[in-house]
Image: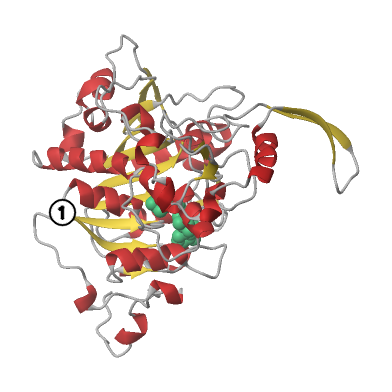
């Protein structure tokens, strides 16, 4: 319901980012706060918005994408850096900085497309005793918030664009593929057809080797769903993902199976006792019938390397250079190890071994995956270190991390350098979303 009382309006204005205030509190939107749209616009809701990776990608695809409502809340810190940055870059209109669990679905405006990168968690469900036949996901599992919105909204969006880690297809280790089967089955039961693809951004010329599962879902009565041909053709050339990210022609025949049973039956028995997930790196599900095949990317355009987007040394603050005396610590952190270690709590001695990481990182290839721990001066095997032309080692700056995710320079300006690296570790390569957005526009022109 839209609140018509405007007396508290000024309480919710975004404060400058430097003040680090949580800018956009929970409440229904006022009429004058709705982002105006025209009939051709594609109205977007962005969940788990972080610093707005989906929004950056979609807005680059076309100005027809209008994000009219977004939600971002960081549970682990009091400071809400991501939300503050989001408001600073895109304005406070339609932004909510509150735990998604507390959002009233009635306050979410009607939209055409829902987007979001949600965490990989345990999606198992139980049947509730109170509500025989009802299901209950584990508390705090954010997939069920997406599900709650789709299942209770007065007009659920026709299209969904979701992102998750690649291991989603095989989790949990004790019952490979169960979590993804629950997601697919629950979307099918809500009337959506779903495509997915594991995409490594670097395979399509983007500057980071970041492999993520992208899902694109559409209502069964949409033109996209109605033009479904057959599993193989859809996955290799006709489908949404195949249009956005070309694949090599392949003789492989997709495996086909039906996800049977209620969500709680899937939760207890899907693929039980098998060592491999049945979900390959691409697939489509229609009315619970899954077609899935391993595809290879087909890309012949230019490739961007880490070296292509580095700042000149003269623009890099001193704190990012590694002092000569610290270089051995980095070499040790990155090096191959096989040594005895002692558990500090139990005193138990154990053998520890790990392989070597490249040191320094190659600047002639796309970067490795940025993780949330990329920031800070302490040596770590996962942080990137490059050797500059002047022969000095250094870490990557926030601007360079933003470029690796294809964000505008200084998108995260205002937060500490450590936090900016964290936010980029959480974000996505916006070039992927841009291509998905362009594909959606192409398909909608036939709707
Ligand atoms: C994988 S990140 C998504 C990042 C985003 N796609 C971007 O481009 O920055 C997931 C986001 O969900 C947020 N989040 C976690 N729990 C949440 C909750 N209960 N309510 C709302 N947002 C939450 C996190 O703070 C994080 O920013």
**Residue 94 x/y as whole percent:** 29, 69
Query: Quarter for ligand 1?
Result: bottom left
Which of the 4 quarters of the picture holds residue 338? top right
Vertical relation: 107 (above or below) 357: below
User: In the displayed image of the protein, which residue is found farthest to the right?
Assistant: 347
**Residue 372 x/y as whole percent:** 53, 49
**Residue 29 x/y as whole percent:** 28, 75
Q: Tell me if I can see residue 241 in this picture.
A: yes
User: According to the image, label 1 marks what residue?
Assistant: 63
Vertical relation: 217 (above or below) 113: above
Residue visible at 25% across and 25% down in the picture? 246
User: In the displayed image of the protein, which residue is found farthest to the top?
Assistant: 251
Q: Nearer the viewer, residue 389 or 291?
A: 389
**Residue 120 x/y as whole percent:** 51, 44
Which of the 4 quarters of the picture holds residue 25? bottom left
Q: How many marks?
A: 1
Q: Tell me if I can see residue 147 in this picture.
A: no
Q: Nearer the viewer, residue 268 or 44?
A: 44
């Amino acid at each position: 319901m839209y609140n018509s009382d405007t007396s508290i309006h000024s309480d919710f204005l975004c404060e400058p980012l430097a003040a680090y205030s949580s800018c956009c509190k929970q409440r229904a939107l006022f009429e004058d706060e709705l982002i105006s749209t025209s009939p051709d616009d594609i109205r977007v809701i962005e969940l788990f918005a972080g610093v707005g990776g989906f929004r950056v990608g979609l807005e680059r695809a076309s100005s027809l994408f209008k994000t009219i409502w977004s939600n971002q809340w960081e549970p682990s810190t009091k400071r809400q850096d991501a939300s503050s940055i989001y408001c600073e870059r895109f304005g406070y209109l339609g932004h909510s900085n509150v735990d998604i669990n507390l959002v009233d679905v009635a306050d979410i405006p009607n939209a055409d497309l829902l987007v979001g990168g949600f965490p990989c968690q345990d999606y198992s469900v139980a049947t509730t005793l109170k509500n025989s036949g009802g299901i209950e996901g584990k508390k705090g599992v954010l997939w069920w918030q997406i599900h709650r919105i789709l299942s209770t909204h007065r007009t659920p969006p026709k299209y969904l664009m979701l992102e998750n880690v690649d291991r989603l297809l095989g989790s949990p280790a004790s019952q490979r593929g169960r979590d993804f089967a629950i997601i697919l089955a629950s979307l099918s039961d809500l009337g959506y057809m779903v495509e997915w693809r594991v995409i490594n951004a670097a395979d399509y010329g983007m500057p980071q080797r970041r492999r993520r599962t992208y899902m694109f879902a559409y209502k069964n009565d949409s033109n996209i769903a109605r033009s479904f041909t057959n599993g193989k053709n859809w996955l290799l050339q006709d489908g949404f993902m195949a249009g956005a990210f070309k694949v090599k022609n392949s003789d492989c025949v997709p495996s086909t199976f039906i996800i049977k049973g209620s969500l709680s039956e899937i939760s207890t028995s899907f693929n039980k006792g098998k060592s491999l997930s049945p979900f390959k790196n691409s697939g489509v599900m229609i009315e619970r019938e899954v077609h899935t095949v391993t595809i290879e990317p087909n890309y012949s355009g230019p490739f961007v390397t880490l070296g292509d987007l580095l700042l000149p040394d003269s623009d890099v603050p001193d704190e990012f250079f590694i002092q000569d005396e610290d270089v051995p610590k980095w070499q040790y952190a990155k090096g191959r190890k096989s040594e005895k270690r002692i558990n500090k709590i139990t005193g138990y001695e154990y053998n520890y071994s790990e392989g070597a990481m490249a040191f320094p990182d190659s600047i002639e290839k796309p970067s490795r995956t940025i993780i949330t721990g990329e920031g800070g001066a302490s040596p770590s095997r996962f942080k990137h270190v490059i050797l500059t032309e002047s022969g000095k080692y250094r870490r990557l700056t926030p601007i360079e991390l933003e470029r690796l995710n294809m964000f505008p320079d200084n998108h995260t300006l205002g937060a500490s350098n450590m936090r900016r690296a964290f936010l980029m570790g959480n974000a996505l390569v916006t070039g992927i979303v841009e291509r998905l957005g362009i594909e959606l526009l192409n398909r909608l022109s036939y709707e």
